[in-house]
Image (cartoon, grey):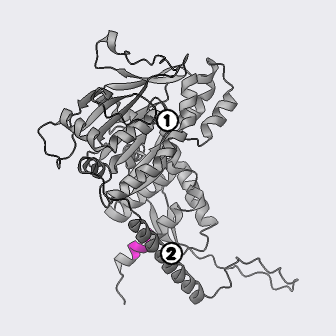
Amino acid sequence: MAKTNFNTVRDNRRLLVNQVAGSLYFSRSSRLRDMFLYVCGRVLDESADEIHEQEVGQEVFGRPADYDTAADNTVRVHASMLRKRVNEYFEKEGSSEPLIIEIPRGNYAPVFRERTAVLPQPGPQAVSAPAATPALHPYATVPLWLAAALAVLFALTSLGLFLHSRSLAAALSPARPSPAVGEIWAQIFPKGKPTDLVLADASLGTLQERIDHPISLTEYFDRSYLTRVEDRTASAKLDPAFSKSLLLKRQVNYGDVALLSRITDMARSVQGDTRVHFARDYSFRDLKANNSLLFGNVSSNPWIEPFQSRLTLRWKYDADKGIYYPVDTAAKPADQEKFHASALPDGSHEGFASLSLLPNLSGTGDVLILSATGGTAMNAALDFLCDETSIRQLRSQLAPKSPLTAAMPYFEVLLRIGGRNNVPRDPSSIVIARRIGS
């Protein structure tokens, strides 16, 4: 009897998992996809035969380790939907798969089993009219050898195109930046590990500017905030149906998108890589495992919330003027709002931007938070990060005795933006520079 190659079996199962996760049944639900990949990974990588609700809640949905599963049914609700999606896949798109995946009730460890063949039952012997020929799948008549050859050809072509694009990208990569700038960007974009660029949810920010109720990260992540729209919009006299429709739209700030090209170029210049995410599609697992660059403030990008307790700078919205301004919570109460934007002689408002560099949730990487009063200030903040004089000046304030080659200490910085498209390299432009303990 031939020996079972367990590595091959595991690889085949992993291939099936990725195939299911990449199907249309998961294309609109990153939460279910994250849950599916996590529980399957626990079985394939760690041979887990039992996965409990508490574990899934903590690892996938960001719940505390001791949260009350009786009061919070998020995992059970998602598990029910997950079972339905997986079953639908194997009943329809994956109906010809010889191996199927099942998520048992009461235990979230997936089970891989061979599909049970359904044998045709003998019918009556009476002569009857010929049965109609069933419609065949478009590829049902393709010989197996031809399908395999086409698959290999597609894979080789895709690989060739991928390698060509990577070579072309490398050839066109910008020159490595100046020393101080290169060091900080290499810290944000480490070689060999993509950094997540998480774009703010502009629709969420717009709604929160109108209602007097912040939407927490937990509500945003599990989508429960969508069921509470009617209650929260009543006091603001907003149409609940319109508000919910607005929240479902994927809208980002133009200022954030305009920076992506410059940021990806900077990442390539230090041999790093990037992945762009919309805030609604991000997850706790990503925030724990990866380096991230978070755009916006906590109103438009709730993924900033877990880091708020370590920051002294906050962003507040002035509904009368329609602008955000920084608040310094470390200052005396009378001075906390001293940066409240006031009109300048030309009728514009003074601009500010904050840059915060912290460890990620697991302490295995770094997170950079980029917030500003508007697109011009955001662009000026990026100019600051790309300017050798500015970074040396910042380092001299944060760690005057550390060598240039040392990692930049964790920090939060508030910049005053003096004018349009001006790099804020003047010493007075750094209004606040504080170290954050690692």
Q: Which residues are magenta?
A: 9-14
On the rendered structure, is 431 left or right of 325? left
For label 2, the residue is: 158
Q: Which element carries disc 1, helix, strand or loop?
A: helix
Q: Position of residue 259 (x, y in %)?
A: 46, 45
For label 1, the residue is: 375
Q: Position of residue 290 (x, y in %)?
A: 34, 51
Occupied quadrant, residue 50: bottom left
Characterize the local packing of mark 2: few (<14), some (14-19) or many (20 or more) Cα atoms within 10 angstroms: few
Residue 201 seen in the current view: yes
**The C terminus - image quarter:** top left
* Residue at 42% from the left image edge and 43% from the top image edge: 61
* Residue at 62% from the left image edge and 19% from the top image edge: 236
**Contact? badges 1 and 2 (CB < 8 Å):** no
Answer whether residue 362 is magenta in the image.
no
On the rendered structure, is 323 left or right of 285? right
